[in-house]
Image (spheres, rainbow, N blue to C red):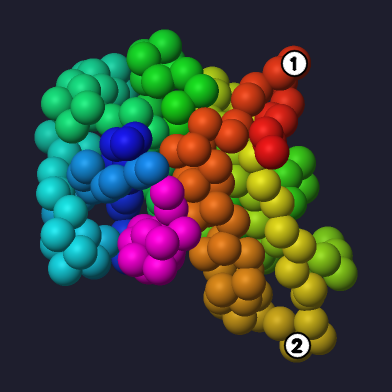
Amino acid sequence: MKNIAVLVSGGGTNLQAMIDAAARGEINNGRFCGVIASKDGVYALERAKKAGIPTRVLPRAEYKDVASYTAAIIETLKELEADLVVYAGFMTILDEQIMHEFAGRMMNVHPSLIPSFCGVGMYGLHVHEAALSRGVKLTGATVHFVNEVCDGGPIILQKAVEVKDGDTPEILQRRVMEEAEWHILPRAVDLFCRDKLVIEDGKVAILP
């Protein structure tokens, strides 16, 4: 049984998608060992508590720099005995220390079809604003392993979503979550927990 730790900074909709998927039996060989928030009072913490998942709050503002904050996150993840670390709307940058400790064991969901509309500064509504500005007809979401490059880790799963006439960034954001993020993130977690993901030459192979 793999221990899954989730890093959050906000409402926790992707956390809820994973909790719901687990309740439906769609995440096998995995259990949530903890939810770590970068600030207190976020609704993701309430979602975790309702699901009986232990929570920790590590406020970024209480640490002098990225290195000390990253060290605290790592220490907490080790205390939780995390096998997999899922970034679910975690808006705080961590440094390379965590890459050494959890290489190949961290994944993130991004609201576009990487390599489009990703990288530094591309988060939240900014991603959907950029997609609409460019006039793309399809966008979507990507689950990828986390490495030292922002949104640059090996791609695990992707799902396309149609862009419709009259879409605003807010409307498109919601459709991408509902039609893509909430489906592929739990599936990627399940695949990891069942040892179905292998990284080869910077690409992810999914075992049968």
Residue 20 located within the stretch drawn in magenta:
yes
What amino acid type should be assigned to the residue bearing mark 1?
Answer: Asp
Identify the mark at residue 166; answer none if there is no mark: 2
Of the numbered discs 2 and 1, the one sitting upstream in the chain is: 2
What amino acid type should be assigned to the residue bearing mark 2?
Answer: Gly
Foreground residue among 6 and 138 = 6
* Residue that numbered label 1 is attached to: 201
Please give the range of residues in magenta.
14-28
Identify the mark at residue 60; answer none if there is no mark: none
**Residue 96, position as x, y percentages in the image:** 43, 16
Residue 125 located within the stretch drawn in magenta:
no
Foreground residue among 166 and 89 = 89
Would residue 105 appear left or right of 147 to someone viewing this image?
A: left
Query: Is residue 13 among the parts visible in the rendering?
Result: no
Q: Which corner quadrant of the image does residue 115 belong to?
A: top right
Would residue 196 appear left or right of 54 to someone viewing this image?
A: right
**Residue 84, position as x, y percentages in the image:** 38, 33
Magenta stretch, main secondary structure, is helix
**Residue 102, position as x, y percentages in the image:** 40, 20
Foreground residue among 142 and 10 = 142
